[in-house]
Amino acid sequence: MTRLLTLLLFFLIVFSTFGQQLSYEEVKQLEMVVPDRQNSQWAKNQPYVVMLSIDGFRHDYAEMYQAKNILSVAKNGVSTQSLIASFPTKTFPNHYTLVTGLYPGNHGLVSNEFYSREKDYWYKIRDKSAVQDGSWYGGVPLWTLAEQQGMLSANFFWVGSEAPIGGSLSTYSYQYNSGVSNQHRVQRILDWLQMPPEIRPHMILGYFSLVDDAGHRYGPEHAKTKEAVLRIDELVGQLIRGLEKLNLPVHIVLVSDHGMSTITNGMVLPEMIDLEDAKVSYSFPPMIYQSDSAKLERLYDQLLQIEGLYVYRQEQVPNYLHFSNRDRIGDLVLMTDAPTIIMEKPQVVTGGTHGFDPYADRDMGAIFYGQGPLFKSGVEISPVENIHIYPLIAEILGLKITEPIDGKLEMMDYLLSKAEN
């Protein structure tokens, strides 16, 4: 009995500690710093960019919930009516698109979960061995581009930042840890910008998940989602006020990876079809991998008969989605329209999700707001694809793009003040 009580007490302590948020001193101790790096003389004379991702922040949330600080960035700077997410409209593919200027099929992160035929291995967002393996990631992320050109960078939880892409990490970075509060993330960004010029990062990226978390659980129009939007708005306000005290040429860029749609219906894939020995990614929208051509043909024919389900062979995915990668995309790609999703097993379908066609579902629209010395004031442009963010940020920082990308500066350079730039 005594041993049982001891074990129960042990697990109680472990779980209560795990649930606690870290102090700011503990957060600083977790920071990974690459030693002996300094800004080049050229880099020290360049401006700064702080780009924050607010996961799942739909294109209309700021107006809908009157997020005053976020709206002030648009009022005092620039914005797009909507930022068109890349397909699939999932977190990992789109975050990595934002910092590489490449469609998911071209940079390699084709979903939150996918299989590589070449590696004979799955990439899954909770598999640290995969997430931290640089061989999964194509392109040249903004932080790698900066470091290669003598400009220091800092990273707070951006997708890909835990892996040594191009052989190295950001000068300052963190492995993902949910115990780091949003408040401490903002404080660390401000502290980075108060470092001596030689070691001060010019390219800073930060990530916040609370709006996406609320959207999934409650749906985009729920009071809890509004609460999450206003909480992130407060953090943006704190950042703006902190930056105003620094007297540095800092550009604030607010983006999101995708929007959010309400869901009410679910199709359970294994109940509709015998998948036999096929490999299936259920990261919405699902992908089926089947190397046996006869079995694949049978699956395809059966799936075509299911009402409300769109099924595409890998080579038949509509061209406008730019979804092509023979190694990593499934032999079959399955899609639906909101409010219906495809599931692995029966469950109650409520709240919200994303992953839908960004051109067919307006609710997949994300955000882009920017404010700073090189941005115009009070300018809004029509919806643009998120592949164009990369060349825009590179232009502000004075970085030379070294490898081909899908994004084009001319799609967004109207937002820049030519007289200043």
Image: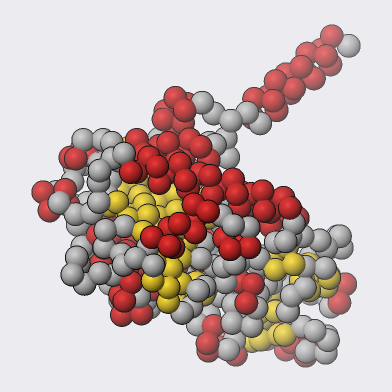
Dividing the image into 4 quarters, which one contains the N terminus?
Answer: top right
Q: Residue 154: image x %, image y %? A: 34, 46
**Residue 124 in view (yes/no):** no
96 to the left or right of 413? right
Most extreme residue toward the top is 2
Looking at the picture, tell me which residue is in the foreground, 107 or 241.
241
Above or below — where is 22 with respect to 72? above
Looking at the rendered structure, the number of numbered marks drawn on it comes to 0
Query: Colour scheme used in the picture?
Result: secondary structure
User: Which residue is depicted at the point 19% across and 65% down?
Assistant: 420
Question: In the image, residue 177 lies at what x, y percent?
Answer: 54, 39
Observer able to see residue 300: yes
On-image quarter of the C terminus: bottom left
- Name the spot of residue 105 as percent of width and height, x first: 49, 75
Residue 97 in the image: above or below residue 12: below
Q: Where is residue 268, by image quadrant?
A: bottom right
Extreme left residue here?
Answer: 41
Which residue: 49% across, 55% down? Answer: 70
- In the visual, does 212 lie left or right of 46? right
Q: Is residue 200 left or right of residue 343?
A: left
| Closer to the camera in the image, 402 or 60 | 60
User: Left of 349 or right of it: where is 143?
Assistant: left
Q: Is residue 403 above or below residue 313?
A: above
Residue ID at (70%, 20%): 13
Image location of residue 342, percent across then percent down? 77, 71
| Residue at position x 84%, y 9% in the image | 2
